[in-house]
Amino acid sequence: MIVLRESKPVESCLIVEGFVGRTKVLSDGGRQIMAVHIPGDFCDLHSYFLPRMDHNIEALSRCTIAKVPHTLISDMILKYPHLARFLSWDMAVDAAITREWMVGIGRRNASQRIAHLLCEMLIRLEVIGMVRDTSFDLPLTQEQLADATGLSIVHVNRTLQSLRRDNLISSSGSRISVKNPAKLQEAASFDSTYLAALRNRA
Amino acid sequence: MIVLRESKPVESCLIVEGFVGRTKVLSDGGRQIMAVHIPGDFCDLHSYFLPRMDHNIEALSRCTIAKVPHTLISDMILKYPHLARFLSWDMAVDAAITREWMVGIGRRNASQRIAHLLCEMLIRLEVIGMVRDTSFDLPLTQEQLADATGLSIVHVNRTLQSLRRDNLISSSGSRISVKNPAKLQEAASFDSTYLAALRNRA
DNA sequence: CGTGTACTTGATCGTCTTCAAGAGCGGTGG
DNA sequence: CCACCGCTCTTGAAGACGATCAAGTACACG
């Protein structure tokens, strides 16, 4: 656990290496991963604006984090006012991704959800140069995948199998290879509009 | 429809009266309401930061909207730099609510979801003085409730009935009366932490 | 009145969950 | 070096929660 719910952080996390998730845990033990962050993401900028964390920040794999003190952020904004806009932009992109996840969990079936997650990862990881030939490393357990998609572990397992059977992806270890990006997008009814901002930063 | 997906708005909407929703529609016709906005909310501040809308803004009831040109926002920020922080705060609160919705859709059952929505509305409407004795006006159809919670219309109907049967709420027309807020919160496993910022604005 | 929209109810069906158990695999310590 | 442990992945079977289909009712509005 990197940052705890209810805490009042005085620094934000910049991910240098590895995968990080934002999670909430319900009283009955149910867990939801609300966002997966990859290297380069500023994963809890919110804590700079909000008084108290309403969720946890968790490492999803072995990872390296740079902690940026809020005071430093404030100083930087004073010096470079333009930075404020960049931070807002970052929050807005983040919110767009969260919204798309919500649609998925609310209205897509299991295979669409998994496929959608993979499509998103393909694009996001590609932007930071972590994709080679439509294949990338996704160091998440099936349990984490389940918590991210609102499914059960067992069903994630079966869904992944069916995606492999349909020849949309293949995987060995944590390496995912998207055999046919176009078909995968179709299976997920994936529309990259919500990620448009990633390509051409304001 | 107030603002269309794919458009590039040059103004943001401030809600003066009525309820507004942010929605996405899937290719198969499925629809998800990702946020419900109430009077006083700045409902598409994102459009000020992002190039293109990734979702729609829809009236959920008869309502009055003030359109604020982006140029005006820019001017105001130049004049009152503190305003920028307020806008970011607004986006952060918004993101917190979206996250909590996601947990609900992903990990709560039907009655918890509905109960949770009502708990949230009770607090948000109370902050803007639209609650009297734990009762408030919620001008949403059951179809809209279904699209907000990721359920079917039929099931929303039955779930509402069971909440009434359990004496947690009562309703006549669009007026909802929360009979026992504490019990409703318990039934929803509602935790108001994510709304904390609403009470004490930065 | 007649029409449209929202709400209600019953019956059936399917997707996904839950429970339970086994297999594979890497790591650790005796 | 091998045995054991824990974690992840896999598989099967049963059952639940919610979706879907199909009518029917209530009510506002022109």
Image (spheres, coloured by chain):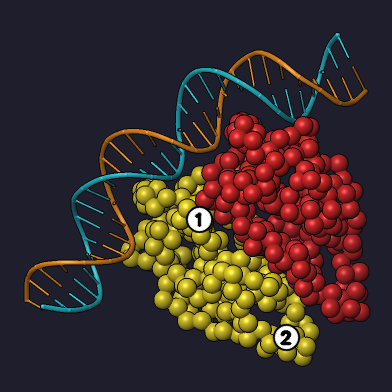
Chain colours: A yellow, B red, C cyan, D orange
- Residue at 51% x, 68% y is A21
Residue position for label 1: A27
Which residue type carries mark 2? Ser
Name the chain under label 1.
A
Dots 1 and 2 on the same chain = yes
Q: Quadrant of residue A12?
A: bottom right
Which residue type carries mark 1? Ser
- Residue at 36% x, 61% y is A171
Task: Tell me: residue A156, above or below residue A48.
Answer: above
B138 or A96, nearer to the observer: B138
Q: Position of residue A162 (x, y in %)?
A: 38, 47
Task: Tell me: residue A3, above or below residue D20.
Answer: below
For mark 2, give the secondary structure: helix
Task: Tell me: residue B133, above or below residue A20.
Answer: above
For mark 1, give the secondary structure: loop
Q: Is residue A135 left or right of residue D3?
A: right
For the residues labelled 1 and 2, the Cα–Cα distance comes to 36 Å
